[in-house]
Image (spheres, rainbow, N blue to C red):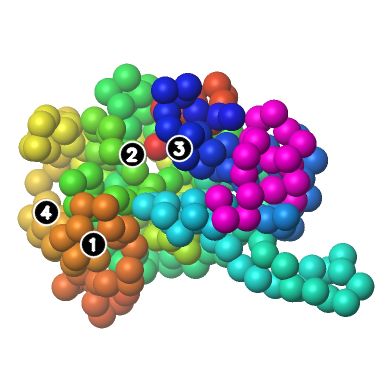
């Protein structure tokens, strides 16, 4: 199974499921719909015959979906087009993070920065990755999109951001949209962008950058242009995110609550993916 051998069996099963749904379905010959869904029965059958994913049944998959703090997955019961009686079966997909180019999951197009519930889009990364990102920008790497969170670590479990982030890159979404960059909002609240034609979100679209030092966030001087309105929006976003999580550090902060300003407008799965995620999330 995927993941670190020191991880619990539950975590390794979840990482293997994530790898299949985001990256490995084609290589493992598991049929996938254009919207990213695969039959849960196909996952279970794969688990039975594969040494990579043994001991997984329907209940295991269902529990992973229900208990995942970032709501990475979605299960639905829909007709099976291959069934002569149009029988309904269970399907599962990853909500985002795909490298399979033919997958197009349901997403809401963002036409204005105010379409983002908190009004904020921020990318968390490591100090090591930042030295390259500062020069070239954020890259989607082998994935279909660059992932951005609606808040910062410490305000609940936020889809689109790692807990281990050391650098926070705030994106000027409106400037990027005006320059022709597309943005979308996934079903579990992650802000997604394919970047430019080369798959990059260039540094010119970075609004500000902060370094996490303990419980403090320290702006990097060369990436911090004074903007009281944006600072206020950040503060409001933090309150909004706190409201989304209800003060629960394990809750998911993706409910459609707006900040005051936005109310009116509204290591790893595999070595390749590990390197991708180190630089892209």
Query: If you read the primary sequence from the N terminus, does the residue marked by circle 3 or circle 2 appear first?
Result: 3
User: Quick check: marks 2 and 4 in contact, CB under 8 Å?
Assistant: no
Q: Residue at x 25, y 38 (%)?
A: 168
Mark 4 surroundings: few (<14), some (14-19) or many (≥20) residues within 10 A: few
The reply to whether dot 4 and dot 3 touch (C-beta < 8 Å) is no
Q: Residue at x 53, y 45 (%)?
A: 97
The spot of residue 185 in percent (x, y) is 45, 61
The span from disc 4 to disc 1 (Cα, nearest Å) is 21 Å
Dot 3: what SS? Answer: helix
Residue named by callout 2: 162
Q: Does the magenta run of residues contain 103?
A: no
Closest to the camera, between mark 4 and mark 3, is: 3
Q: Earlier in the sequence, mark 1 or mark 2?
A: 2
Instruction: State the SS at label 1.
Output: helix
Label count reads: 4
Q: Secondary structure at mark 2?
A: loop
Q: Nearer the viewer, residue 175 or 125?
A: 125
Residue shown at the point (11%, 54%) measured from the top left: 231
Q: Mark 1 highlights which residue?
A: 245
Q: Could you tell me residue 127's position as x and y percent?
A: 27, 23
Rate crowding at label 3 as few (under 14), some (14 to 19) or many (20 or more) other CA atoms within 10 Å: some
For the residues marked 3 and 2, what is the alpha-carbon distance in whole angstroms?
A: 16 Å
CA gap between label 2 and label 4 equals: 22 Å
Q: Position of residue 33 (x, y in %)?
A: 74, 57
Please name the residue that numbered disc 4 is placed on: 231
Mark 4 or 1, nearer chain start: 4
Q: Nearer the viewer, residue 166 or 22?
A: 22
Asked if residue 130 lies left or right of residue 23, the reply is: left
The span picked out in magenta is 42-60
């Amino acid at each position: 199974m995927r993941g670190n051998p020191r991880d619990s069996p539950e975590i390794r099963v979840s990482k293997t499921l994530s790898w299949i749904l985001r990256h490995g379905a084609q290589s493992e010959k598991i049929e996938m719909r254009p919207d990213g869904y695969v039959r849960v029965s196909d996952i279970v059958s794969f688990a039975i015959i594969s040494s990579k994913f043994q001991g997984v049944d329907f209940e295991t998959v269902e529990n992973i979906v229900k208990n995942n703090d970032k709501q990475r997955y979605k299960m639905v019961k829909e007709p099976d087009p291959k069934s002569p009686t149009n029988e309904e079966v269970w399907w599962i997909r990853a909500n985002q993070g795909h490298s399979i180019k033919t997958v197009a999951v349901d997403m809401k197009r963002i036409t204005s920065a105010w379409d983002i519930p908190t009004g904020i889009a921020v990318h968390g990364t490591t100090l090591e990755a930042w030295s390259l990102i500062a020069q070239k920008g954020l890259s989607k790497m082998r994935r279909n999109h660059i992932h951005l969170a609606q808040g910062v670590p410490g305000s609940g479990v936020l889809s689109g951001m790692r807990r281990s982030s050391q650098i926070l890159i705030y994106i000027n979404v409106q400037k990027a949209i005006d320059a022709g960059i597309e943005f979308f909002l996934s079903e579990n609240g992650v802000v997604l962008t394919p970047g430019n034609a080369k798959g990059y979100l260039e540094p010119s679209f970075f609004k500000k950058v902060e370094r996490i030092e303990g419980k403090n966030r320290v702006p990097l001087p060369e990436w911090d242009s004074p903007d009281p309105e944006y600072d206020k929006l950040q503060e409001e976003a933090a309150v909004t995110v706190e409201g989304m999580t209800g003060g629960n550090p394990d809750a998911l902060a993706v409910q459609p609550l707006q900040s005051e300003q936005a109310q009116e407008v509204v290591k790893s799965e595999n070595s390749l993916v590990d390197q991708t995620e180190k630089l892209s999330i």
